[in-house]
Image (cartoon, helix red, strand yellow):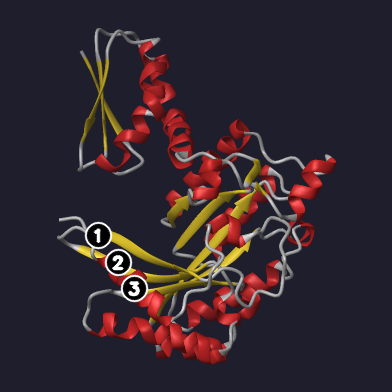
Amino acid sequence: MKIRHYTIPIFIPQLACPFQCVFCNQEKITSRGHIPDVNEVRSIIDEHLSTFPKGNKHIEIGFFGGNFTGIPIEDQEKYLQVAQPYLEQRIVGGLRLSTRPDYIDEKVLGLLKKYDVTTIELGAQSMDNDVLIQSARGHTAEDVEKASRRIISAGFRLGLQMMVGLPGDTLEKAIYTARKIISLGAKETRIYPALVIKGTKMEEWYNQGSYKPLPMEEAIFWVKTILPLFEEAGVEVSRVGLHSSTGLLSGKELVAGPFHTSFRELAMTEVWWDRLNVLLHEEKKNKISISVHPSQYNFAIGYYGKNRKRLMNHFPEVIFQKNPLLKENKFHVDYY
């Protein structure tokens, strides 16, 4: 039976981050301006645990939304200690956190190892120094490389997050960032198209006309170009597109940019079309049957059946079937 993975998110917005990146307003992105205390963290964990279905599953507790390793050591320990009973009783299988690459050193890693943290995610955002400077990240690509090596050497699972469409970014730079993430040994990544959020420097630039976010179609093209690179390298893409917070869904906090609640499906639809469009060169038959791995079934059919509709312009009948024996990036075709 397939193991289902769940992460219990604990958001600590803006805590201990001395920088104000041009795209960042954590309170509005997460809809959480409040920093939870220990009792609240425990309640959040218990509440999430009560919602998970029975069965074979792996659960992690994740500390997100700020610069976790930049907060005082005693506060880090306070949060990490809350999770210990859940680890000891094997209710959860690991801890993860997100932080900045310039807040990783041997002392920090020693503390995280002590409390059984398993995964460390770094907000790399880009591996191009010009993009990092224009985005006011406050760190360099070299900082990401150095921190990544330290994390892996200390035995942690490495995650590297990237953004596409930041000031100064290009498709070539985004591809370069993806390839660097792979070469640095990351086991997972998250891909976020840059959005213009209220209360950020990018909003000011957008209103002045000096910054334009990627149009939706272009953002989809960039991401669908990048996704196969990670797939071929065996890097897990744990998220595509920003979390659908209340502020983003209502439109109250989103000024502009390629936000969509199904962004991953939109991008994967195009990834699969790149694979399936070779069938248009085949001779028309009465029916075509396409088998794909179950995890790729909806992506192959496409968002609102887009790929099926494309194929039906060429074939009289198109059906999709699930075959767990196929690799996730492969398909099999039968003609009738």
Tag 1 residue: 51
Tag 2 residue: 47
For marks 3 and 1 on the same chain, the one whose residue lies earlier in the sequence: 3
72, 269: nearer the viewer: 72
Tell me what residue is drawn at x 59 percent, y 65 percent.
123
Can see residue 62? yes
| The quadrant where residue 55 appears | bottom left
Give the vertical position of 193 relative to 200 (above or below). Answer: above
Secondary-structure class at tag 2? helix
Seen in the image, is 128 located left or right of residue 116? right
- Residue 270, horizontal then vertical, whole percent: 47, 32
Q: Badge 3: few (under 14), some or many (20 or more) residues near its Cα, within 10 Å?
A: few
Label 3, label 1: how far apart the Cα atoms are: 13 Å
Amino acid type, label 2: Glu
Amino acid type, label 3: Ser
Give the vertical position of 25 relative to 154 (above or below). Answer: above
Label 2, label 1: how far apart the Cα atoms are: 7 Å
Amino acid type, label 1: Thr
Tell me what residue is drawn at x 46 percent, y 42 percent.
264
Tell me what residue is drawn at x 57 percent, y 70 percent.
66
Tag 3 residue: 43
Secondary-structure class at tag 3? helix
- Residue 189, horizontal then vertical, whole percent: 49, 58
Secondary-structure class at tag 1? loop
Cβ–Cβ under 8 Å for marks 2 and 1: yes
Q: Badge 2: few (under 14), some or many (20 or more) residues near its Cα, within 10 Å?
A: few
104, 7: nearer the viewer: 7
Label 3, label 2: how far apart the Cα atoms are: 6 Å
307, 70: nearer the viewer: 70
